Amino acid sequence: MGRITLDKVRKAFGDVEVIPPLDLRIEDGEFVVFVGPSGCGKSTLLRLIAGLEDVTDGEIRIDGTDATRLSPSKRGLAMVFQSYALYPHMSVRKNIAFPLKMAGLSQDQIDAKVDGAAKVLNLDSYLDRRPGQLSGGQRQRVAIGRAIVREPSAFLFDEPLSNLDAALRVGMRLEISELHKRLATTMIYVTHDQVEAMTMADKIVVLNAGRIEQVGSPLDLYRAPRNVFVAGFIGSPKMNLITGPEAAKHNAQTIGIRPEHLAVTDGSGTWTGKVGVSEHLGSDTFFHVTVEGFETPLTVRAGGEVSLHYGDTIHLTPDPAQLHRFDAQGLRIA
Amino acid sequence: MARAVTTRRKIAYTALAWIIGLTIFFPILWTILTSFKTEAAAIADPPVFFNFDWTLENYAVVQERSDYMRYLWNSVALAVGSTVFGIIIAVPAAWSMAFVPAKRTKDILMWMLSTKMLPAVGVLYPIRLILIETGLLDSKAALIFILMMINLPIIIWMLYTYFREIPGEILEAARMDGAGLKAEILYVLTPMAIPGIASTVLLNIILAWNEAFWTLTLTTIDAAPLTAFIASYSSPEGLFYAKLSAASTMAIAPILIMGWFSQKQLVRGLTFGAVK
């Protein structure tokens, strides 16, 4: 079990309110990702759930029981830290065994579980090494091993991949997703990387300045962002947001169109502009196009074989079905 | 060309280091040499370095005249005793300052350090009178307490800077792993802090061992440590340099040997936190 409910949870450091009262339900077995720009309170929210920070007001319930004032060690949650936070003076084996030792298991049980976890995470041959002798990816695996051995009711991940290089990050992302499928345990994952959020989550919680902007599945958020913030945050490259007379034509304060929903049309199009920088990724090409009267250049996604040069004139036509409209408050107009 | 300059510079720096090192060590070397001279050779002018008749006579006389072992034991008791009690008080203090700092923690640390700037002689009479009133003059217990108190700011500061280097996330990880406060301190913090605690202990033993103001002014016989042993050889009837040197050598030998063997720990302790 791992159902976590936050009820009007508020956090303030002195006079500074970092999380205004907030409600959230996390169902058993869900993979929930907290995503948002740095300083949005996502890590603080995770630490409140962990018990590493005290809740100022409100209630946190884990599997129906009030855990608001429970110490971290009593909540039955496991956490993987950004810095891995391994015990430097203990071998890998002792690191992984530590939570089991704290739980008072017998040495035989501990050995069996540690060996099991080591096998799953490919750490068998490193068990007698110290964390200092391991690479970043191996340390991350040890941290995960330490979390899974005691079968917690939920896993908390605090930006676990941000210290790894790009290639390793993609690999570990898959491993964590696979681990979730296999264990079917609740996981709460904090990241500032919306690609991680989109690829891993069952449910994404988008946070901004301590407030929840939207909760939903990755595709819900992609298809129907509730406001301008979510529209600009989810999706890569980010959605083009256009204000002014062009938006007024659609009875909106702001209109949004994703780079992949802009078609490059021959001869004529809705908008005409000049090609700036192009980014060739092989499979795709992204053009940055300056359109007269628009405040910011548009990003356009085209096929990998399309080749345009700096300064070329280009005609663009948005897919009307994929046009997002937002009102003066930045909220979505249905 | 660049290489030649580097080599020359290296030689120059090495020579300079040796000169400074020998200059600092010279008084100790001179004391040790003098302790093996006759009284006449000790005050010879011009001074003699190595070409004198080596003798152990001074050591024999010093042994005969006073009970070295009793002074030694008192020194050990004062240095170790004040350090052990100091650590017992300082570890929790430094822990709370490093990991649960309050608004005024920095001020308290500075204030503690400022007490070291008080001239000791300023409080000599109040303390002496208190000890006389309570009958604790010339008692090891009182001196252990006083030595502990004067070194406590340094112990707390050293431990504090050392604990500050321990990432808080590791302690949080221990909490998440189900460790209560006791287990967190016992299995995670203490093993990680052992090098820091060790160098703090070493430095404090040396400080307490060498402390001469309070040990000379508050002891007569029973609690007198090696500092008093040396002082007893600078008598008003005239100085016997060779004997004084022999007594000094015997007094500093234990701490010198200990310092030699724990050099690495000490340097680490004194420079810890200077560079990341």
Image (tube, rainbow, N blue to C red):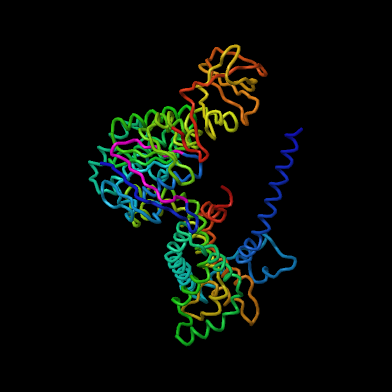
Q: Quadrant of the N terminus of chain B?
A: top right
- Quadrant assignment, res A264: top right
The answer to whether residue B55 is above or below residue A296 is below
Q: Residue at x 27, y 40 (%)?
A: A151
| Secondary structure mainly formed by the magenta segment | strand
x and y percent of residue B114 in the render? 59, 69
x and y percent of residue B175 in the render? 36, 50
Using the rendered image of the protein, determine whether residue B6 is visible from the camera's viewpoint: yes
Is B66 left or right of A48, judged from the image as shown? right
The answer to whether residue B276 is above or below residue A272 is below
Question: Residues in magenta?
Answer: A18-35
Furthest-bottom residue in this view: B133
x and y percent of residue A78 in the render? 34, 43
- Quadrant assignment, res A69: bottom left
Q: How many marks?
A: 0
Is A284 left or right of A70, judged from the image as shown? right
Q: Is B272 a magenta residue?
A: no
Looking at the picture, tell me which residue is in the foreground, B78 or A80.
A80
Q: Residue at x 53, y 83 (%)?
A: B128
Furthest-right residue in this view: B1
The answer to whether residue B243 is above or below residue A125 is below
Is B17 left or right of B125, judged from the image as shown? right
Q: Is A33 a magenta residue?
A: yes
